[in-house]
């Protein structure tokens, strides 16, 4: 007899994503820590987080909200039956497989095990094998976290290393691993070798890719060009992602945020906060789905900001923020070995304050980024 799957209430789902309030949902724990604490898979928690940030606890409610609005239980059941029949008529076998451009993990997040429609039927409509839905991969092991930390440090030193050299590097340190594990870990970390190469990947469906506008452009003033990027931050038990927005002329960091998932919401929050400083003429990013998403690019287009995007595999197109990541990791992350998310948040706040307001920059004639930015934007600080 198979093990009965757990069914969680809306209140439980809300508690997982908001252990100590709305703002704590993104910054207090890694997905690995939450998964261990609540005995849930990180993918499920990540999906609940996305739903939560879109609509709060009500997104987890099913028929209860209708009942509270005066609809009877019988009416609810009738609506469910009508909807189920309609979906069956409109969802012939094989249709979703051809029409839904989604990954296995995304489809798993769409399944609602406590819905009136069976898991088998939901999987069939989505073109998802039931074994893929029920599969529960293990948490990242201590060894994998150690390997990811070493990969991150080596990538900062040799960003042109792809998985073959990274594999040789780790094997040279005595780790008996193959290239497949290195490839998977590098993909999870969001890193790839930096060198010109043919386009071998496809952007997210429906996302517009903008041309690179900064080739041979001379940077002469603050707010001429801003850029953004995401980097991997290792912790003792798990990892986080960090996004930052930088002014190219002054190297001033306009805003930064951390997140335990790559849902893109923290990138939008950071962009909106940075725009309180002013409005750049050009905003540059890579072609990551967080930055090509309509919700992100619409903010820039509404503000009449020109959008520029790096070429695939050309991180040097966004060189200023890449140099900043190197400074941050060598001067703070690798020295302090943060154990928890709160400790990381405090440490990053101290470093960004130091970098912006105290650390002289050789390329700025030993001014700080804030001093350089303030020369042309006196309203700063």
Image (cartoon, helix red, strand yellow):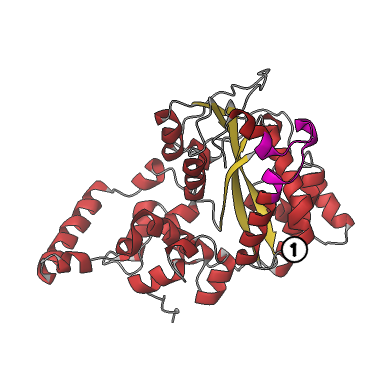
Judge from the rendering whether residue 85 lies leftward or rightward of residue 271; answer left or right: left
Judge from the rendering whether residue 19 lies leftward or rightward of residue 118; answer left or right: right
Q: Relative to residue 81, is residue 225 depicted above or below?
A: above
On the image, the x and y values in percent for residue 16 come to: 45, 70
Q: Which residue is drawn at 42% across and 63% down?
A: 22
Q: In this orientation, which residue lies closer to the viewer: 184 or 53?
A: 53
On the image, the x and y values in percent for residue 36 come to: 56, 74
Residue situated furthest bottom in the rendering: 1
Q: In this orientation, which residue lies closer to the viewer: 191 or 201?
A: 191
Q: Is residue 360 magenta-colored?
A: yes
Q: Relative to residue 1, is residue 19 depicted above or below?
A: above
Res 73 quadrant in image? bottom left
Q: Which residue is drawn at 77% across and 40% down?
A: 360
Q: Is residue 251 visible?
A: no
Q: Which residue is drawn at 74% across and 51% down?
A: 329
Q: In the image, which residues are magenta? A: 354-371
Q: Which residue is drawn at 29% across and 66% down?
A: 115
The residue indicated by pointer 1 is 337
Q: Is residue 149 magenta-colored?
A: no
On the image, the x and y values in percent for residue 285 come to: 58, 34
């Amino acid at each position: 007899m198979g093990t009965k799957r757990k069914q969680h209430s809306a209140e439980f789902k809300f508690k997982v994503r908001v252990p100590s309030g709305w703002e704590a949902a993104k910054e207090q724990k890694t997905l690995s820590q939450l998964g261990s604490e609540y005995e849930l898979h990180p993918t499920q928690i990540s999906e609940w987080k996305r739903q939560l940030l879109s609509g709060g606890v009500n997104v987890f409610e099913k028929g209860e909200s209708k009942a509270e609005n005066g609809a009877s239980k019988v009416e609810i059941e009738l609506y469910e039956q009508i909807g189920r029949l309609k979906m069956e008529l409109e969802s012939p076998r094989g249709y979703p497989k051809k029409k839904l451009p989604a990954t296995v993990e995304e489809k798993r997040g769409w399944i609602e095990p406590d819905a009136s429609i069976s898991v088998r039927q939901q999987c069939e409509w989505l073109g998802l094998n039931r074994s893929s839905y029920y599969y529960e991969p293990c948490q990242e092991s201590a060894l994998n976290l150690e390997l990811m930390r070493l990969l991150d440090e080596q990538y900062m030193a040799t960003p042109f290393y792809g998985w073959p050299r990274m594999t040789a590097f780790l094997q040279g340190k005595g780790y008996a691993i193959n290239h497949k594990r290195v490839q998977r870990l590098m993909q999870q970390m969001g890193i790839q070798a930096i060198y010109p190469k043919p386009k071998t990947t496809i952007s997210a469906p429906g996302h517009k890719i903008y041309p690179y506008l900064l080739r041979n452009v001379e940077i002469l003033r603050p707010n001429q060009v801003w850029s953004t990027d995401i980097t991997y931050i290792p912790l003792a038990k798990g990892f986080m992602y960090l996004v930052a927005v930088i002014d190219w002329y002054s190297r001033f960091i306009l805003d930064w945020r951390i997140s335990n998932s790559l849902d893109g919401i923290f990138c939008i929050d950071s962009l909106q906060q940075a725009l309180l400083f002013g409005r750049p003429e050009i905003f540059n990013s890579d072609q990551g789905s967080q930055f090509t998403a309509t919700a992100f690019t619409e903010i820039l287009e509404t503000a009449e900001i020109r959008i520029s995007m790096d070429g695939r595999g050309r991180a040097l197109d966004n060189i200023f923020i890449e140099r900043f990541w190197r400074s941050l990791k060598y001067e703070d992350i690798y020295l302090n070995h943060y154990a928890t998310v709160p400790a990381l948040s405090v440490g990053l706040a101290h470093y960004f304050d130091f970098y912006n307001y105290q650390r002289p920059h050789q390329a700025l004639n030993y001014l700080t980024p804030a001093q350089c930015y303030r020369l042309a934007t006196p309203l700063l600080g």
